[in-house]
Amino acid sequence: MRLTGEARPGLLFALSELLASHGLNIEHLQTERHYRSGGEALKLGDYRTAGQVFFTASGRVSAPRGPNVKAVQASLKELEQDQNVVAVLEPTSRLRSMDSFR
């Protein structure tokens, strides 16, 4: 699981609330803040993001029973639109007999 967007209060709360609503547990979570310089924005062709601070959360989530992956992904799409972020959920192999996702 990965989420990236402009840093602001409430992003991690919105993500964890979404995951919990689908019965997913956060097994591992790492967060980082990134500053986008003018040069980096120029390379990406997105001048509007120069000088902004971005937030990235990545980790592993799991569920005691197989979650409805399509429903989770649909909720993530809504989160992307509501919060102007990019969110990705990638199924992985089983971990301790629980369905696991990155």
Image (cartoon, rainbow, N blue to C red):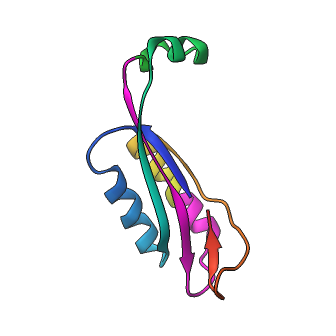
Report the span colored magenta: 51-74
What x and y, as percent, mark residue 51?
A: 37, 19
Name the one closer to the observer, 67 or 98.
Answer: 98
Query: Where 100 sits versus 52, above or below?
Result: below
Q: Does the magenta stretch include residue 10?
A: no
Q: Give the quarter of the figure containing the C terminus.
A: bottom right
Name the one closer to the observer, 17 or 31.
Answer: 31
Hey, which quadrant is residue 35 in on the image? top left
What x and y, as percent, mark residue 85?
A: 46, 41
Horizontally, residue 83 falls left or right of residue 78, namely left
Horizontally, residue 45 falls left or right of residue 57, namely right
Residue drawn at 28 percent across, 51 percent down: 10
Q: How many discs mark residues in the rendered view?
A: 0
Q: Does the magenta stretch include residue 69?
A: yes
Query: Where 19 sits versus 80, above or below?
Result: below
Residue drawn at 54 percent across, 52 percent down: 2
